Amino acid sequence: MQASIRLPRRRTIGAAILLAAAGWLSAGHAPALAAGASGAAFTHVSAPTRYVEVDGARLAYRRFGKPGGVPLILCQHFVGTMDGWDPKVVDGLARGREVILFDNAGVAGSGGTVPTTIEGMAKYAAGLLRALDVKQADVLGFSMGSLVAQQLAFEHPETVRRVILVGSGPRAGVGMASLTPEFQEMLGKKHDNPDDLLLDVFFTPSEQSQAAGRAFVQRLHARTADRDKDIDDKVAPAQVAAFAAWGKPQDDGYLKQIRQPVMVVSGSHDIVHYTVNSYNLQQKLPNAELIVYPDSNHGSIYQYPDRFLAQATMFLDGVGVAKR
């Protein structure tokens, strides 16, 4: 599969996922600025990459948006980087609060070793907040990042105020002990254009969903300067190991201890983390609401960015979620 892919000098997001996943399947990523510098004038396209030491690793991050309130830290998906976030979604969130994007240890521009557990990834996320002197934060996690968000909320209730879980699932969730067969099938499929992988994995085959997917892919290329480094071949195996540890049979009682308000978001036909897992999260978390977008896959928030932004903004601003 690798030999069939022709890459530009700077890989696309889809190409990075393809090559990282191909390595796993065949075996069975600017100068630093002061941490306190204002990011109010920046957007997803222009925010500079900064660096900070966390537990011996030099983490790459970008911080921008409206200052003064509770910032929102975003935890990214499998083999994803800061450039893999949808600029429309991130900038929409940044209009009402500061957002913090980052590459976890060993990923793209960050140094250190890629953690092989979700707990290890959450440790770096918590360390980043401490290094940036953030006393309280909201957390948005997408896919693998949503598992990190759960762990962060569980371990640091004094720091995490509100949580958004997108394309998520609990420990020992349905089909979560490894990559799902449907996801593996898409990873193994030949894609002449690497970005087509995102259309297969994040969107359904319907005409409407694919059209939204093409618009999303186009937005991903908006940032042209100071882009993330490519991920290396150590990222995917380590993250697959973290998936396996999370998904193996185990008790899910930890969910009862996550008492912060949680907004769970899923696509109606999620092939990466089956939709039933989001339903199970909502049922077992003490203070959660569930949103399922129609005719959508793993990238549901990128298919319905305007609707998601409206609902996420209401949630983060404290509108809704009555405690059960």
Image (tube, grey):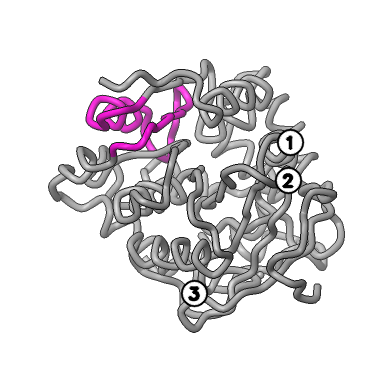
**Which class describes the residues within 10 Å of circle 1: few (<14), some (14-19), or many (20+)?**
some
Q: Choose between 31 and 318: the one closer to the eye.
A: 318
Determine if the magenta segment contains residue 283: yes
| Amino acid type shown at disc 3 | Lys
Q: Work out whether mark 2 precedes mark 3 in sequence or the reverse, and give the earlier one.
A: 2
Determine if the magenta segment contains residue 153: no
Report the span colored magenta.
259-288
Distance CA(mark 1)–CA(mark 2): 6 Å
Q: In the picture shown, does residue 281 fall above or below 293? A: below
| Amino acid type shown at disc 1 | Arg
- Which mark, residue 95? 1
Q: Give residue 165's quadrant in the image.
A: top left
- Provide residue 205's location: percent of width, then percent of height: 59, 25
Q: Work out whether mark 1 precedes mark 2 in sequence or the reverse, and give the earlier one.
A: 2
- Provide residue 20's location: percent of width, then percent of height: 55, 64
Q: Choose between 323 and 81: the one closer to the eye.
A: 323
**Which class describes the residues within 10 Å of circle 2: few (<14), some (14-19), or many (20+)?**
many
From the image, which quarter does the N terminus lie in?
bottom right
Image-based side of 134 in relation to 281, left or right:
right
Discs 1, 2 touching: Cβ within 8 Å: yes
Q: Work out whether mark 1 precedes mark 3 in sequence or the reverse, and give the earlier one.
A: 1
- Provide residue 102's location: percent of width, then percent of height: 60, 60
Q: In the picture shown, does residue 148 fall above or below 264? A: below
Q: Which residue is mark 2?
A: 65
Mark 1 vs mark 3: give the one in front.
1
Q: Secondary structure at mark 2?
A: strand
Distance CA(mark 2)–CA(mark 3): 32 Å
| Amino acid type shown at disc 2 | Gly
Q: Which residue is mark 3?
A: 234
